[in-house]
Amino acid sequence: MMKFNQCTRSFFHKTAVRTGGLMFPVICLSAFSQAVWAEPTKSSDETSLETVQVTTATKTPRRLDEVPVQTTVVTRDDIEKTHAQNLAEALKYVPGVQLKPIHGKTGEGVWIQGFDPDRVLILVDGNPVSPSTGSTVDVTQVAIGDVERIEIIKGATSALYGTSAMGGVVNVITREPTANFRVSADVSGGNWGEQSEKDNPLAKKHGNFEVSTKQDKWYGQVIADLTESDGFKAPDTAGESTQGWNGHKNTVSGKFQYAFDNDLKVTLMPRYFDEDAATLEDVAVPGFGNRTEEYRDKTQVTNIATVVEQRLKNDWNWKIRAMWEGFDNDSNKASHRKTFTDHSEAAAQLDMPLGDSHLVTVGAEFQYDYMDVKNLSTGTQEVADETKESTSVFAQDSWFVTPNLEVLPGARFHNDSRDGSHLAPMLNAMYSRQDWLPGRVNIRAGVGNGYRTPNLKELYYLFDHSQLGYVVQGNKDLKPESSISYQLGLEWVFPDDGSLGVSLFHNDIDDLIAEALNPNKVGPNGAAVYEYQNIEKAMTEGVEVVFRKPLGSYFRLDASYNYLNARDVDTKKVLVERPEHEAKLGLDTYLWKVVTVTVKMNYESDQYLDEANDTVSPGYTTWDAIVNYDINQDWRLYGGVNNVTDVQRKFDGTDFRPEAGRYVYLGVRFQYED
């Protein structure tokens, strides 16, 4: 069969804002007195384009340098090198990906080139993660101790992944055991200096523990990921208020598979998450002054997923998967409310090689969502047992027209219990040559239809904070969002490792759903009423540049720049919370055969915070320093400083710079395999 060959990115974006001053402080790293340089570095099997396997872009296993939709991959090596403890930390340095705090709770959401977290689909092994606020997934709740890699697709991939993927897809792929017996432990701790809430050098502690085995026909793996924090208090904040959460976030997960003699495999993947996180808030009480209250979030997430798959003798493959996830949250803040959501999903997929130049994939999915929200403070039923169902069928054909040209047409037919039917088509193509320049040159072009139906929160939610002066309420008259996305990209894959890519994009969006003040409504006690509304037309366009290359034998550079222009077409105003400019830089230095020093830089320009574009949050630059020392193949010592220059926001509601200041930590990792 003809070899499938291509590396593409279909991505579409949204948003923008103003520029700010980019500052590059000089960081001096002092090494030991006897400097012995490492041997020349080479790309490991885990990081080279030719060896990384991905599945998200096409829903079929492909080599990274051959996928027809360009995919960004965070490997296991990347995760361990940067000491990431959850999905948010693992995505921190990915080009075009931004992490922002979730309004009203602890945690962070993923913004992909202008699309907010409500429009980014978060998956674990292809199964969706429940949103912590009814529409936004808190990626700090997703532990990554058992992760093999993370795949990121940017843009309107709705033809493959449905309504939640209008902005993009982040798929966390957990690893399978490879050793007869394996045990590992990774423990670390650190503090925020004078900002730490307790006089404790280990103000934050993290541990990840794994036990796994692989036998002839089966394997099993159990992972426990535990995080405990005392929290922190930013300087110059009045009263007893704290900004960093105190409490714990723990995850226990498993992965078990049995392989039958006829190539039939059955996989079971249970996962349980438990969070108890609190901050202190100074609340103004009329007639009494300020009173300190504890704002606490208690969350339990139970997930069970199973996959049954088989490779047939004619190289056809079929797969059936099913999952259920229950999200239970008790939030006692300005109001005390209990939220329960239930997400169930079942899907079937068939991959069919046809002739020498076609790989056809067809599939069907069914989804069920349930939400119930009670405000215990007011006795209000904010969402009353609301449900939503959808059924989808999809198809795509990976067609090699010539050895250098691959075309990937696809479509998804979606039927929603509330919003009816919609057909979302997509078309991507890539032309690849290996005789124009050393290595490979890939030219990509694509157009796709993004589509997203209103979720249960946007339709029915009543968020009553009238005691703080505002109410947020759902809108049953919302219409689905839809977009047409265009992309054009050029990539040069170097023959000796590394690449340079430039991508252009344009997005036309109809009926974008956003919160907006409704001047015609007044809430309890005269509170302002914010309501979910459709913005008739919005537009985004921009460019992304990514460069990766070893610099000689002892250095490796990763650099990216993103420009984004996103506006309301009618008002010409810039969409809020979208920085116009973003730059990221990473430099690995191999000082010794066993020591690696890494410096990372993230920059974001100014961003507007209001629809009138009157309020601006300042731009900022952060630097991180990371050190790894491999004692032997079983032991590693590591440490680092996050936010070296201690850049931190003013907690006045108009500053969206980082919440946490400088954080210093140390850790040790042990693994044993038999």
Image: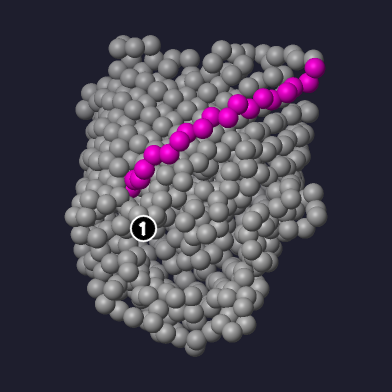
Q: Quadrant of the N terminus?
A: top left
Instruction: Report the front residue among 238 and 380.
Output: 238
Vertical relation: 377 (above or below) 224 = below
| Viewer can see residue 216 | no
The x and y percentages for residue 99 are 49, 49
Q: Where does the magenta region start and end?
A: 14-33
Residue 556 lies in the magenta-colored region: no
Residue 21 lies in the magenta-colored region: yes
Residue denoted by label 1: 610
Instruction: Report the front residue among 344 and 460.
Output: 460
| Viewer can see residue 430 | yes
Vertical relation: 100 (above or below) 541 = below
**Along the horizontal axis of the image, is 663 left or right of 378?**
right
Using a 10 Å C-alpha cutoff, classify the residue at mark 1 as few (fewer than 14 neighbours), some (14 to 19) or many (20 or more): some
**Along the horizontal axis of the image, is 128 left or right of 567?**
right
The x and y percentages for residue 443 are 28, 25
